[in-house]
Amino acid sequence: MPQISAKSALAIALAALCCAGTHAAIVEDAIGVTFPDRIGKMALGQRQAFEDTRLGAVTRYEEDGRSLAAGGLTVGIYVYTGGLSHVSTDLASHQMRGNFHEVISEVKMMEQLGKVKAVRLPADGEHVTNLPGCGPQFLWERYEIDLDGTNTLTSATYLTSMKEHFVKLRISYRKGDAVSAPLAEEFIAGLHHVLGGCAP
């Protein structure tokens, strides 16, 4: 498998922290999915394709009226192959769990490179969703990112796959924000149906 540089990995890890602006629906041809202008109370932002084609593209959503800087919820949806010609659909496979551990390591790398003060990972590791209805399930893990000793984010990474691509979500909001936490759960449930091509 081609190796992704630390610089590229950091670009992935930080991209979800960027700002978003409202856009019309975006078609992600790689997986045959149309991301709607809204999922729950989240508004569609921009799609960015990375120069390294192995990294694919990221599509962003942001909470109505509240950017991450203002305490709101922000989401990045990454669709990529990592340079692989085949991506397993089995969440329990060595490939899927290996890729999940890699993306969690990318988060920890932000601390090691001095981009944030600390990344605090949970002791219980990753979990698997059990979302009802059609659509894929996800490997996921929640953690905290201490930006500067004063501002801390609650973040989570979700990973699934479809049509020979990894589909990863990075979700972030200000720690302790009572509004954003339930919006995050609502967004995951909504995206589950969007990826499955069915109504909630």
Image (cartoon, grey):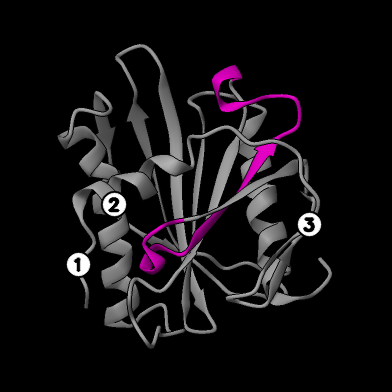
Looking at the rendered image, the quarter that the C terminus falls into is bottom right
Relative to residue 33, is residue 60 drawn left or right? Answer: left
Mark 2 or mark 1: which comes first in sequence? Answer: 1
Residue shown at the point (57%, 68%) measured from the top left? 130
Residue 28 picture location, percent across and down: 64, 68
- Name the residue carrying label 2: 9
- How many marks can you see? 3
In which quadrant will I find the N terminus?
bottom left
Q: Residue at x 58, y 32 (%)?
A: 19
Q: Nearer the viewer, residue 126 or 167?
A: 167
Residue tagged 3: 25
Q: CA distance from mark 2 to mark 1?
A: 10 Å
Residue 3, numbered circle: 1
Q: Is residue 61 magenta?
A: yes
> Residue sitting at 57 percent across and 44 percent down?
75
Q: Which residues are magenta?
A: 50-70
Task: For the residues labelled 3 and 1, say whether their Cβ atoms are less than 8 Å apart.
Answer: no
> Is 72 situated above or below 130?
above
Q: SS for tag 1?
A: loop
Q: CA distance from mark 3 to mark 1?
A: 33 Å
Amino acid beneath label 1:
Gln
Q: Secondary structure at mark 3?
A: loop
Q: With 66 as the anchor, is 122 left or right in this view?
A: left
Q: From mark 3 to mark 2, how far is it between C-alphas?
A: 27 Å
